[in-house]
């Protein structure tokens, strides 16, 4: 299902990261970078909550809108019960919709927020997401401190938080959004999320093109997040073989966030914050400079449950896509 928006814009955005992200290829584009993973907190989960609140504060200063004037907050993260998001929002007496779409949470938030603004139900909506490498590893696999070996196909969960303000004005237009379907590629390997999510990305991209009547060349850039280097390759091959579509103007935010030759990040980045970190900073900057006019961001999420994996079940995935247009 694809939604068309006529009067929804990204007014401003903010990005906060940890040390790995700040030392990557696009580190200079982030609003705030930290040199450690605790950020002055006692544990990883509280550190992630802190990042969310920092992204709110930065966004407030950038857009000149008081958080008290925001009509609605929409956001989520990767942890059980989206705990960091709920704890962060407990500091604000504001309406909040908590969402979970794993690493596709950012685009789902944009689509929901855009729909509410387009329908006249709200004027100012703040959407956000976050992830923390150590917190995610502890929940989904095993604590990093255990020192367990990992295969080359595994991705490295990004640490950071990203927020954006949706209003009826701005220079980045939220033109449309496509809600994806849950796709099971029968992959059971928790260390190969690129293979888990690639088919879901293809499914949503094709649905978006069909719903809008567009050709793949309509966009100056197709972005997925966060397939990593191996999932990126799978997607390109699958799109060509299954649909006859060649992804030429294409990249993956999981590949873009880190320098795989210099940083120990395996197949690249992952996590809910991966796609918005790259998009809200570097890509938006390039759009405002005129390099890209139309961008399709297809964020992918592995809907993984450790319990279900222990039951020997495969891992379903989902992808939600948004069409972004520069208006300057």
Image (spheres, rainbow, N blue to C red):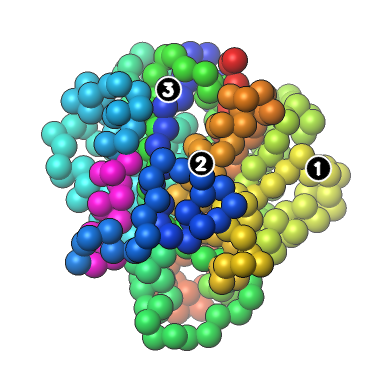
Mark 3 vs mark 2: which is more N-terminal? 3
Local SS, label 3: strand
Residue in the picture at 60% in, 42% down: 298
Percent of width and height locating residue 189: 58, 74
Write the residue at 57% across / 67% down. Answer: 263
Give the crowd class for mark 2: few <14, some 14-19, many >=20 residues within 10 Å.
some
**Circles 3 and 2 in contact, beta carbons < 8 Å:** no
Q: Is residue 71 or residue 252 the one in the foreground?
A: 252
Kindly identify which residue carries mark 1: 248
Q: CA distance from mark 3 to mark 2?
A: 17 Å
Which residues lie in the magenta part?
A: 43-55
Coordinates of residue 215 in the picture (x, y in percent): 78, 29
In what quadrant of the picture does the N terminus appear? top right
Q: Earlier in the sequence, mark 3 or mark 1?
A: 3
Name which residue lies at 29% across and 29% down: 60
* Label 1 neighbour load within 10 Å: few <14, some 14-19, many 20+: few
68 in relation to 29, above or below:
above
Gap in angstroms between the C-alphas marked 3 and 1: 30 Å
Main SS of residues in magenta: helix
SS for dot 2? helix
Q: Which label sits on residue 182?
A: none
Residue 267 visible at all: no
Residue at x-position 48% and y-position 61%: 20
Q: Nearer the viewer, mark 2 or mark 1?
A: 2
Residue 123 visible here: yes
- Which residue was labeled with disc 3? 11
Left or right: where 107 falls relative to 203: left
279 is higher (above) or lower (below) than 189: above
Residue 253 among magenta residues: no
Mark drawn on residue 29: 2
Q: Is residue 327 left or right of residue 250?
A: left
The crowding category of the residue bearing disc 3, from other C-alpha atoms within 10 Å (few below 14, some 14 to 19, many at least 20), is some
């Amino acid at each position: 299902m694809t939604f068309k928006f006529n009067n929804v814009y990204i007014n401003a955005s903010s990005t906060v990261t940890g040390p790995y992200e700040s030392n990557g290829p696009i580190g200079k584009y982030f609003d705030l970078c930290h040199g450690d993973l605790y950020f002055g907190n006692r544990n990883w989960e509280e550190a992630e909550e802190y990042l969310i609140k920092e992204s709110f504060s930065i966004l407030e200063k950038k857009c000149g809108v008081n958080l008290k004037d925001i009509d609605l907050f929409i956001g989520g993260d990767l942890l059980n019960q989206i705990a960091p998001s709920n704890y962060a929002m407990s500091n604000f007496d504001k309406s909040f919709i908590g969402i979970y779409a794993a690493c596709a949470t950012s685009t789902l938030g944009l689509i929901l927020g855009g729909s509410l603004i387009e329908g006249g139900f709200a004027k100012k909506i703040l959407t956000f997401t976050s992830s923390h490498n150590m917190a995610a590893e502890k929940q989904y696999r095993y604590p990093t401190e255990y020192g367990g070996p990992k295969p080359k196909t595994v991705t490295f969960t990004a640490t950071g938080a990203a927020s954006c303000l949706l209003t009826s004005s701005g220079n980045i237009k939220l033109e449309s959004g496509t809600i994806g379907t849950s796709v099971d590629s029968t992959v059971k390997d928790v260390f190969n999320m690129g293979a888990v999510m690639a088919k879901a990305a293809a499914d949503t991209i094709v649905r978006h093109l069909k719903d809008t009547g567009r050709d793949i060349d309509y966009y100056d850039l197709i972005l997925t997040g966060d397939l990593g280097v191996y999932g990126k390759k799978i997607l390109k091959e699958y799109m060509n073989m299954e649909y006859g579509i060649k992804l030429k103007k294409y990249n993956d935010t999981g590949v873009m966030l880190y320098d795989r030759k210099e940083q120990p990040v395996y197949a690249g980045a992952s996590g809910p914050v991966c796609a918005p970190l790259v998009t809200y900073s570097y890509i938006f900057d390039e759009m405002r400079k005129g390099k890209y006019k139309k961008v399709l961001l297809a964020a992918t999420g592995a809907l993984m449950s450790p319990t279900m994996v222990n039951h020997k079940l495969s891992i379903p995935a989902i992808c939600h896509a948004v069409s972004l247009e520069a208006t300057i």
